[in-house]
Image (cartoon, rainbow, N blue to C red):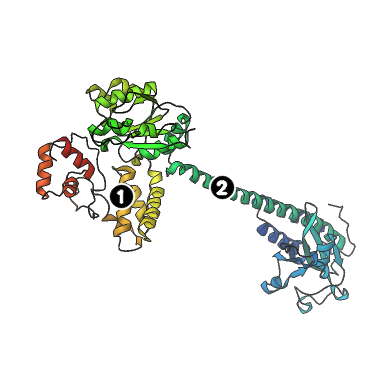
Amino acid sequence: MPPHRTDPDTPPGTDWHAQELLLMREVMKLVGRSLAPAFVLREMMHLMSELLGLNRGRMVLASEAPLGGKLSERTAAIRHSYGLTAEEVQRGTFRWGEGITGRVLASGLPAIVQDVDAEPLFLFRTVPRERLPPQTVAFIALPIDVNGATIGVLACHRIRSRQRHLNDDLAVLRILATLAGQLLQLEQLVAEQTRQLVVRNAALARALDSASARYGLIGRSPALLQALSELERVSQSQATVLLLGESGTGKELFARAVHLASGRHDQPFIKVNCSAIPETLFESELFGYEKGAFTGANAARAGWFEQANGGTIFLDEIGELPLAMQSKLLRTLQEGTLVRLGGTREVKVNVRLVAATNRELAAEVQAGRFRQDLYYRLNVIPIRLPSLRERGEDIRALALHFVNRANQTHQRNVNLAPDALARLEAHPWPGNIRELGNLIERLVLLADHTLVTAETLERFMPQTPGAGAPPPPALPGEVGQVRDYQSVRSHSAQALRDALAQHQGNQSRAAQSLGLTLRQFSYRLRKAGLR
C-alpha cells in the first residue's frame, strides 16, 4: 500500500489511513472465516461503503464466451454487489467494449471518471442519474485479472468533493481487485477439482459396478470380493478348483468366472450336474461311448470331457458321483486320458476341472462314500463361496437385478419401494441367492400393483420356522422357494409309493410333495425299481 497523503481539507478526527487498515483487517478476517467468494466479496464492498465512502460497489464478471462468437459479442454481468437494488443488478449487463465497464473489460486497464455527467461513454445503465446524489459523482472501475486475463471489473461510485484523494481510493481498490481475482481463481480451481472428482468418482463407480458385476456376479460386499480375489489369483493356473458352500450360493457362476478369467476363456465351458445323471449313465455321459457299446448306440459319441477339451468342465454336486466313477475320474485327472465306454483306445484330453459341492467331503471320505485320493486331488484350491447372509450389502443390488430380469422375461413393470428393499435386506435368506431370485420372480408374476411396498411384500416372504403363518403364494407346479440338498438315498421306496398313491400317480405332484424335481423323483423311482 502506498504511503497515505494527508489532505489539508480533511475534517479533524477523520483518519483515512486507520480506516484503510481497518478495512484490510476486516477483509482478511472474512477470508479467514470463509473462502466462498459470494460472501467475502459482498462484505468487502459493504466495508468499502461504510469505511471509505465507496458506494454502490459491484463486481461485474464475464459470462461464458459464445461458441465461435466474436469477442465483441461476449457479455459480463453483475454477480456481487452492495447498495444496488435487485432491479439495478438485473440491468447491469455489458458487452465487451460497451461503456466504461465494457472498455475496462476489453482493455484490461483501470478507468477513473471524475464526473459521470461529463463523460459521454458513461451509460447510467445500472443506476439512473436521478437515483444518484445531486453532487458531482465519480466512478472508478478496475480490472480483475486471473492468470493474465481480465475476467471482470470491480467498480463503485464516490462523491467527487469528499476530502480524500481519489488516488488513495484507487490504491485501495487495486489491492481489493487483486484479492478478488485470487478468490475467484481459487473458486475456479476448487470447481474444476470438484468437477474432476465427480467425473473420477462416477468413473470409479462405473468401474466398481462393472468389476462387481463381472462374470455375472452382482455385488460389492467384502465377502464376495474376497472370493473373487481368490478366484482370480488361481484362474491362470491349471490346478483343480473346488467350490464349497451352501446350496444356492451361485456355484455355477463362480465356475464360469474361473473359466472366463483363465487363458481358456475362448474354449468350451461344459457344466455337468452329477445329481441329475442316473448311475448307469455316468460313464457314457462323462467319457462318451463307441458305436455298439450298448443297445441303441448306433454311432460313437464324445462325452463331456472330450467336448470340454482345451477348456473347462464344471462338475456340480460332485459328491453324488458313484464310487466306481470316482476312480475313473481320478485316472483321467492324473493322466489326462480317457477311454470311451466300449472302446479300447485312449483319448488325450486337456481339461481344467472345477468341482462344486455343498457336502462335507471330508466327512464323506470318513464314511467311505468318497475316495480319499480323489478328495485330495480335488481339494488343491478350495474356495468357499459366501452365503447371502454374509453379503447383506449385496441384497439390494441383487433384488433390483432380479426384478429387472423378471420384468423383461415376463413383460411386466414391477418396482420395489424403498421399504420393500429394506425388508429384503432384513431377511436371513437361508436359501441364499436362489431363494431371493425365486421370490422376486414370484413377486413380479403375482403382484397386484406395479410398486411393491413392504406390506405387499410380506405375504410373499418365506416364513420362519414355527411362525404358524400360511405359506406364500406358489406358482403352479412350483417346487418351493428353496429346495434343500437331497441325497439320492433321501427317500425310501415306500415313501415314493406313498407319494404316488397320494397324488393318483401324478409324478409332478408327488415330486413336489417330497421337495424334489421331477427328474430327481424319476431317478429315485428307477433306483428303487418302481418304473
Q: Which one is in front, 204 or 124?
A: 204
Say which residue appears at 22% left-offset and 52% top-offset: 477
From the image, state whether disc 1 or disc 2 is nearer to you. 1
Say which residue appears at 31% left-offset and 36% top-offset: 299
Residue 70 location in percent, x, y?
79, 65
Q: Dot 2: within a 10 Å radius of its alpha carbon, few (fewer than 14), some, or many (20 or more) residues? A: few
Residue 93 location in percent, x, y?
74, 70
Q: Which residue is mark 2?
A: 203
Please tell me whether residue 298 is drawn above or below residue 381 in the rendered image.
below
Kind of residue at badge 2: Ala
Kind of residue at badge 1: Asn
Instruction: Give the CA separation, mark 1 to mark 2.
Output: 33 Å
Residue 18 is at least partly visible in this image:
no
Q: Which one is in front, 136 or 175?
A: 175
Considering the numbered disc 1 on the image, is that residue within a helix, a strand or a loop? Answer: helix
Going by the picture, which residue comes out furthest to the right? 8
Please tell me whether residue 422 is drawn above or below residue 158 in the rendered image.
above
Q: Dot 1: within a 10 Å radius of its alpha carbon, few (fewer than 14), some, or many (20 or more) residues? A: some
Q: Quadrant of the C terminus?
A: top left
The dot on residue 520 is none
Q: Which one is in front, 20 or 198?
A: 198
290 with respect to 239 (left or right): left
Residue 343 location in percent, x, y?
31, 26
Say which residue appears at 38% left-offset and 61% top-offset: 413
Residue 321 location in percent, x, y?
27, 30
Which quadrant of the figure has residue 241? top left
Please tell me whether residue 134 is drawn above or below residue 149 in the rendered image.
below
The dot on residue 438 is 1
Residue 58 is at least partly visible in this image:
yes
Q: Which one is in front, 85 or 392?
A: 392
